[in-house]
Amino acid sequence: MSQESSRPDSHSETQVATLGGGCFWCLEAVCEQLSGVERAESGYAGGTVPNPTYHQVCTGTTGHAEVVQVTFDPDEISFREILQVFFTIHDPTTLNRQGADVGSQYRSVIFYHAEEQKRVSEAVIQEFESEGIWGNPIVTEVTPFEEFYTAEGYHQEYYRNNQQQPYCQAIIAPKVAKFRKAFVDKLKQ
């Protein structure tokens, strides 16, 4: 994986990344631990129904993906580095599926906020493809960001507030552990 950074000059404003890779609880649990991330918020993007509810999104009929919107300081962590973590904690080769979670709401997707994010996304995908890490083609969508709808309050900081739940112990905790081991240098102090 190229170590090239896409960090802009110092004194940058915060930037936003909107990513979907299965259940948003998993992504949020990891992203909120990254140094340079100011906020990771669970929600919905990419659909046609305004202000969807969790129950509507779960039907798979609204077109939304469960996503995490990450507000970050590009002087501390680049969009490229966030994507490297993103591709490490989910399987980007399964169409509309992550483990037992099945449906278009669980698709692997990057909603880019600027042309530079699109360029970096495509470059990172190409780098991972050329490394052949998964053995199957990456199916992650790279699509323009349009609208983000914040998920209901009980979805926010779900892992942090519910670590004893069976889903958290069986699914999220191993992803968090894998992330913490692989990216120890990127953890908040």
Image (cartoon, rainbow, N blue to C red):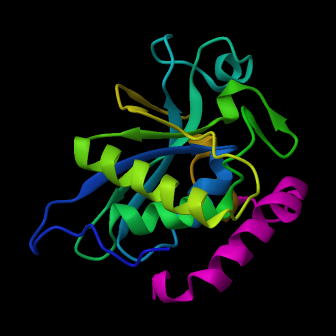
Q: Give the percent coordinates (x, y) of residue 111.
A: 42, 37
Can you say which quadrant of the picture contains the C terminus?
Answer: bottom left
**Residue drawn at x 57%, y 61% as measured from the top left:** 130
Question: Vertically, is 32 above or below 46?
Answer: below
> Which is more toward the observer, 3 or 88?
3
> Which is more toward the observer, 154 or 102?
102
Task: Describe residue 73's horizontal placement relative to residue 166 as left or right.
Answer: left
Q: Give the percent coordinates (x, y) of residue 100.
A: 88, 41
Q: Bounds of the magenta span?
A: 161-189
**Residue drawn at x 80%, y 70% as measured from the top left:** 174
**Residue drawn at x 22%, y 59% as measured from the top left:** 14
Q: Quadrant of residue 8?
A: bottom left
Is 18 contained in the magenta span? no
Question: Vertically, is 86 above or below 67?
Answer: below
Is 162 contained in the magenta span? yes
Task: Describe residue 166's horizontal placement relative to residue 158 as left or right.
Answer: right
